[in-house]
Amino acid sequence: TGTAVFAAVDIGASSGRVILGRLTEKGPELTTVHRFPNGVQVLDGALRWDVDALFAEVIVGLRSAAETAASAGETVQSIGIDTWAVDYGLVDGDGELLHLPFSYRDGRTAATIDAVHAAAPQEQLYARTGLQFLPFNTVYQLAAERSLDGVQALLIPDLLAHRLTGVRRTEATNASTTGLLDAATGTWAADLFDALDLRPEVFPPLVEPGTVVGQLLPDVAAATGLPAQTTVVAVGSHDTASAVAAVPATGRDFAYISSGTWSLVGVELDTPILTDESRAANFTNERGVDGTIRYLRNTGGLWLLQECLREWNAEGPLPDLAGLLGAAAALPAGGPVIDADSNDFLAPDGMPARIRSAAGDLPTREAVVRCILDSLAAGYARTLQDAARLSGRRIGVIHIVGGGSQNSLLCQLTADRTGIPVVAGPVEATALGNVLVQARAAGLLEAGHGLAGIRHAARAAATTDRYEPVPRAALTTAG
Ligand code: LFR
């Protein structure tokens, strides 16, 4: 049967990939076997995800994983799935989707937030769930559904796992983004279901990362060429949970920025912080792998840049991103900064105009790019200051993982604005965290020390770059 390898299905808001991971003597090794685009689409008059297309890409990727493994004399032992959080598909008793899932960027919850808060005031929601207020939290989306009679809500990774195995489960890290999980116990907050008139069975039972969900359905095994005994293992199915698990940190005095479409900025704690002060600062207590608490805030992300590039691309030939970033880096420090965390930047379309109207005069595309990156770095600094203040945690180093770790201007600006060294990488932290949780479940990594064993392995895999803060004075004299 050969050496065991693990398939990570990692789907973000703008792209997805299937990655094979194996543990070698030198450390974990990742091989990307399939990449595909993703994006919100206007379908049936709303912003939605085409999960049927995504599922087809998952099958293509798993087939390629099976072939790649076989040609190396290896066997895919299990599959882990992670995606963005919050969104779900509604399925009937036969497992059929009622309609394509809404995207969190759809504005339909504007009409439901007040009704939810009338039944369960925001103070109460925060005290129970520790979840930051975001207009798209699952709890507001469920309130926008016409009827939930006889149906179940499957979070996106759980929906894909269900299509692979026929088994319905709700993975715990992602469940913590619904706004219906008790932050202290990690179990469903039954009183909130009552208050909001939701049946407790609207979600399938919870499972923790590392749990076997089930084996492949026969038609899936046939379509992918994977052995029928291949399992789907629950990982940190919230992509941010997988990314944070694989932060190559030693010790505890670190902060992380999972930098992609969003920037998730915070620290890792053992217990949630549910104070009024924390609520006022809109910090979230999402669950991480091994019951850790991801104490963080959603801040603006590369979405702003992605949307600008999409629009500029539609106006003419695709701008050369490296050239644009180089030109942005050459602009002097101290340019305009916007609040990149604002909900004004949530929806797609017209992004350069929205940024220009918030920032004032930005004469060139590179000025827009520089404004975005300066604003992201300013948001990171502000958020990390809050995280340190509210948690009492000292921050000795900032780990930037995900796509943004490859943006050297963003990393340097972050070091400069925070005055704290930045360690950048790995870019595929999410897939790495996904693979390592599977490897541990298979008994290939030492268990029982919380995330220490996973981080030890992550350090062996990671190639990182270090950015030292340049003091203000040096910045001004150099310019
Ligand atoms: C990042 C992420 C964030 C979540 C947002 C919406 O990909 O998962 O953690 O707040 O997407 O689901």
Image (cartoon, rainbow, N blue to C red):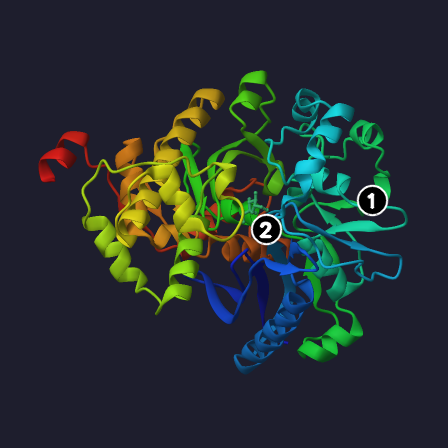
Kind of residue sitting beneath label 1: Val
Q: Is residue 274 visible?
A: yes
Q: Secondary structure at mark 1?
A: helix
Left or right position of 372 against 363: right
Q: Is residue 398 visible?
A: no
Question: Which residue does the image show at 54% across and 27% down from the upper left?
Answer: 282
Farthest bottom residue? 71
Is label 2's Cβ within 8 Å of ligand 1?
A: yes
Say which of 433 and 370 sits in front: 370
Q: How many marks?
A: 2
Question: Which residue does the image show at 63% across and 44% down from the upper left?
Answer: 107
Label 1 packing within 10 angstroms: few (<14), some (14-19), many (20+) = some
Left or right position of 359 against 169: left
Is label 1's Cβ within 8 Å of ligand 1?
A: no
Say which of 258 and 268 sits in front: 258
Judge whether 19 appears above or below 284 on screen: below
Rendering coords of residue 456 (x, y %)? 45, 48
Which residue, given by chain and number where applicable, does mark 2 sit on? 84
Q: Quadrant of residue 179?
A: top right
Say which of 52 and 175 sits in front: 52
- CA distance separating discs 1 and 2: 20 Å
Which residue, given by chain and number where applicable, does mark 1 sit on? 202
